[in-house]
Amino acid sequence: MVISLLVWVVHAALWGALAAGRLPLSWPVLIAIQGTAGLAGGALGLASQRLLMGTVPSQGRSHFFALYSVAAALGQGVAPIGWGVALDQLASRQLWVLNAHAMLYLAAGLLLAGAALACLRLREPRALGTREFLAELLVHTPRRALARWLNTSE
């Protein structure tokens, strides 16, 4: 979860640099912005679902997930309205070389960095450590796939 939040921080920084005119509007920059959004969004969604699955007791889990989904969807629907109101309030202000858009992306990046720091305190008792995860991802899984492929190709 921390890594996905840090990728979101990079995403906000890219948008902020683009809004401030520090990055050119080009295909590589747009690909980087959209790539970080996709990577961070997917990873954060998976990490939060896994954390919820480990936190919520099995009895009433479906009800809790329904409430969680509604709350998340409402937040995603209301956030652009809040963003627009904040842009309207900041439209006439400038902070150093930052315009209103860049200031909001800076604020979003700082909030995401704070969330990443707060997530360092989270503990998942059933989660794999980094070493075990990388061994599973890079050694065990490919070995099983190769063994399966060799057994079926005969």
Image (cartoon, grey):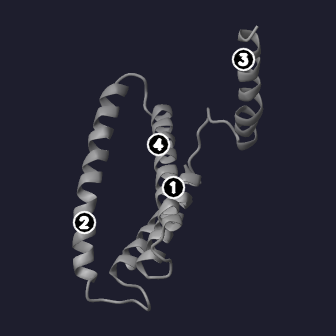
- The tag on residue 149 is 3
Residue 141 position (above or below residue 90): above
- Badge 1 or badge 3: first in the primary sequence: 1
Please state which of the two labelled residues, at mark 3 or mark 4, is closer to the viewer: 3
The answer to whether residue 127 shows anywhere in this view is yes
Q: CA gap, disc 2 to disc 3? A: 52 Å
* Circles 1 and 2 in contact, beta carbons < 8 Å: no
Mark 1 or mark 3, whichever is nearer to me? 3
> Amino acid type of disc 4?
Ser
Q: Is residue 114 visible?
A: no
Q: Name the residue under label 4.
A: 48
Mark whose residue sits in front, 1 or 2: 1
Q: Do the residues labelled 3 and 4 touch (CB within 8 Å)?
A: no
Is 21 placed left or right of 7 in the picture? left
According to the image, label 1 marks what residue?
A: 35
Q: Earlier in the sequence, mark 3 or mark 4?
A: 4
Q: Tell me the SS state at disc 1.
A: helix
Q: Residues within 10 Å of mark 2 (few under 14, many from 20)?
A: few
Q: Distance of mark 4 from mark 1, alpha carbons?
A: 20 Å
